[in-house]
Amino acid sequence: MILLNPRKIKLMEKSWINIFMKKHLYIYLILFIILIAYNSTADDSQSFNQINFFSDEKTAVEKLKVDPTEDNAKELAAIRFKYAIELYVYSKKNNDWDAFELALLYASSATKLNPAEWVYWLLLGKIYSEIEVEGVVLALDPLQNAIKLNPNSFEAQSLLGTCYSRIGEHVNAVIYLEKAAKINSKKLSKGLIQIMVHSYAKEPQLKRGIRFFKWMIKEKKASPYAKIALALLLRKSGKQSEAEKILEKVSKNEQSPVNDKKMAAYLLDLWTKGAKQ
């Protein structure tokens, strides 16, 4: 068993995740789902020192060497998962590549020590997805493993779909993004909807995209922005009149978000000018 070298990465003197170290895994899952959205709330006024925060890992490694049981391996995996999250958050806040690389190593180690925990695979896939091109491809297998273990994970399904879109595999992209939308349509952000529109338009699957967004709207599972997405696909398929009627409803609906109303009005104006040219 090789102890990963912390390489003197600067970490917070008091780790908020350490408080939960001995709690149930679902607490880590909650923390990680927050991490997916990544909007760090760490107090920048807290002091940082180059100190060793890995004593619990050393203890777990020695314990596993003496008694190589499954439970001891799981304990070490949980510790390395914890540090992978900390290092990843730190690397994002401070643009620190060394911390990012170490986060990747710790996340990878967690999956090897305890491959049955889907959230470990999700974290590994998330970190890989931050690396352009090559990393996105490497993210596919960990995310697929996460989905095999937990097919109802919105985060895993949506991230896998996004990765497929980024490498140009648009058929696979919409398959997983549709699954994510069916799991929890409320989490389907404008960004994810835009990726779906992009992927539907890139392959000969416009009809599929139109059917899907119509279904979401009919079942009242769609945000107002999904109606704009539907209008874009309808126009792409040559049904501009139908698309314009949808945009008119969005632009005049008082319950529509202000930005969606502005977008609908902008597209209507743009299409009208285009028709005159």
Image (tube, rainbow, N blue to C red):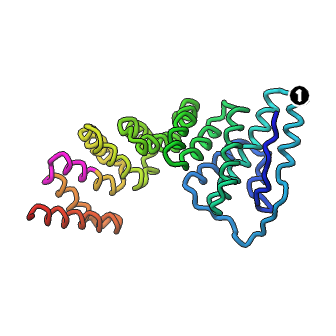
The residue beneath circle 1 is 67
Image coordinates for residue 4, horizontal then vertical, percent: 78, 43
Main SS, magenta region, reads helix
Residue 204 screen position, x and y as percent: 25, 37
Task: Identify the residue at horizontal 43%, vertical 54% (top origin).
Answer: 189
Q: Compared to 256, does 192 lie above or below?
A: above
Instruction: Give the side of residue 71 with respect to residue 27, left or right.
Output: right
Residue at 36% of width from left, 54% of height from top? 223
Query: In the figure, is residue 2 to the left or right of 38?
Result: right
Residue drawn at the location 54% of the way across and 40% of the way down: 139
For the point 57% across and 41% down, the residue is: 125
Residue 71 place in picture, x, y as percent: 80, 30
Among the 4 quarters of the image, the one containing residue 57: top right
Residue extent of the magenta highlight: 230-241
Q: Is residue 82 magenta?
A: no
Q: Is residue 215 visible?
A: no
Query: Secondary structure beneath disc 1?
Result: loop
- Residue 151, above or below 13: above
Picture quarter with the C terminus: bottom left
Q: Which quadrant would the N terminus be assigned to in this image?
A: top right
